[in-house]
Image: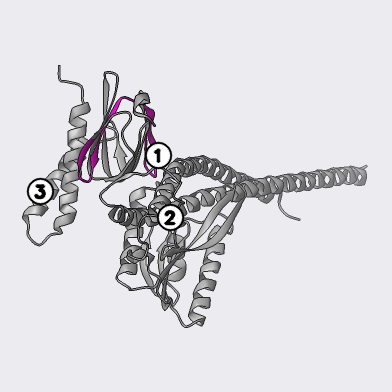
Amino acid sequence: MPNLRDIRRRIRSVKSTQQITKAMKMVAAAKLRRSQENMIAARPYATKMLDVLNSLAARADQELHPLLRVREEKVVRVLVVTADRGLCAAFNTNILRRASHFVAEREGLGQAVSLELAGRKCLDYFKRRPTPVEDTWTGLFNHLHYEDADRIAGTLMRAYTEERCDAIYLIYNRFKSMISQEVVVEPLLPISRLEPAGESAGPDYLYEPTQQELFNTLLPRHVTFQVFRALLESAAAENAARMTAMESATNNAGDMIDRLTLYANRVRQAAITKEIIEVVSGAQALG
Amino acid sequence: MSIFELPKAIQLVIVTPERNLVSQEVDEVTLPGVEGYLGILPGHTPLLTSLKIGEIRYRQGKSVNYLFVSWGFVEVLPDRVTVLADVAETPEDIDVVAAKKARDEAEKKLKTPDSEFLVAQVALEQALARMQVAAKAAPLPK
């Protein structure tokens, strides 16, 4: 027969855990709102950028730029984006599983794979594994800056133009909705061919400097923005995942408290009944 | 658009990847284009240019505002100007103390021959432009 005091202690402990998970859920919800706002804030920039790039693509020579040049994929680099922290259900595990799978698949084809890691969780995972790691970036997600994306993208583009790798992929969680995230693998470099807008699209601009130069300065920005968007998506997805995970943890704790309380009451009742029987039988023995 | 029906104002939109800074009607905009500052009035011919480090000045009636920008590009249409900047800051955002520090450091680096010259130069330009914008927007001393 378990001790009543032990059960009560257990209930108290579960209650304090529940308080923590509840608080974490609220924090995640607040952060989620912020990261969604960031995603929305980035949208006008993205749309305009693509418009301009496409209209330039029609007028500039796409073969000239090194970021567009396609090479045979012998050396592949992957940017893996996870969270810095855990407690967000399968968020990190899904990414890591997909990334390991990707690495194995590419190595199976005889390609050399190296990694760029964003987020402490993938760093912890891959530092104990044989795949070479080029660069690591941590502490990005608390406050996501465009400069961070700029630094990462700059490193990637340098590696590509200096022909240290032939293709670069992104693996990250896409934010689908509050309750679901999706792991995606996207090619980052070489930049997939842009769809030149038709002649009718947009007015005929004056260009300063020339169209080609303008096109060339916009391409790296396009790449940087892709990285930035992936980071934003991942941040939002992380917070959404953590929110749902903490929500169900809070609910589970509630259920557990209910069950334990019921049990505690039963044990108390049994103890009282036992005492009464003892008193009554004692009295009978005397009488 | 015919020359006889020039638009009366410009719809100015300034966005960065992080936020939407300005979205309003203005009478005049001045921008730091790669080939020099451009003044834009309503009815400007369509133009696409990239921006360098500098200040954006926009006027509506008598109120004049300044912004710091660092790289980006701009699309000009007769009745609309869209600025996509990598970094853009309002005078309130600018940390003058930090900018001064950045300027001093950059100047020091420029004097040592083996340091990264271009990086320091960009840092210096940014610091100077930031200070300039902050100074212009500050209320006149009493």
Residue, disc 2: A226
Disc 3 to disc 1, C-alpha distance: 31 Å
Please give left or right for residue B53 compared with residue A225 in the image.
left
Q: Is residue A73 left or right of residue B122?
A: right
Above or below residue A65? Residue A101 is: below
Which span of residues is magenta-colored?
B13-38
Residue visible at 23% across and 40% down in the picture: B32
**Which dot, 3 or 1, sits closer to the camera?**
1
Question: Which quadrant of the rendered structure holds the N terminus of chain A?
Answer: bottom right
In this rendering, would A234 be left or right of A252?
left
**Which element is circle 2 on?**
helix
**A81 falls in the magenta region:** no
Q: Is residue A32 visible?
A: yes
Q: Tell me which chain the residue with mark 1 is part of.
A: B
Q: Position of residue B110 (x, y in %)?
A: 9, 53
Quickly name the residue at label 3: B107
Three-letter amino acid code at the position of disc 1: Arg
Estimate the x, y position of residue A178 in percent, counting from the top left: 60, 46
Q: Position of residue A62 (x, y in %)?
A: 37, 62
The three-letter amino acid code for the residue at tag 3 is Glu
Is A278 drawn above or below residue B5 in the view shown?
A: below
The amino acid type of the residue labelled 2 equals: Gln
Query: In the rendered structure, are the residues bearing label 1 and label 2 in contact, judged by CB atoms less than 8 Å apart?
Result: no
Category of crowding for the residue at label 1, using alpha-carbon neighbours closer than 10 angstroms: few (below 14), some (14–19), many (at least 20): some
Name the chain letter of the residue that bears numbered label 3.
B
Residue sitting nearer the eye, A263 or B134: B134
Name the residue tied to disc 1. B19
Labels 3 and 1 share a subunit: yes
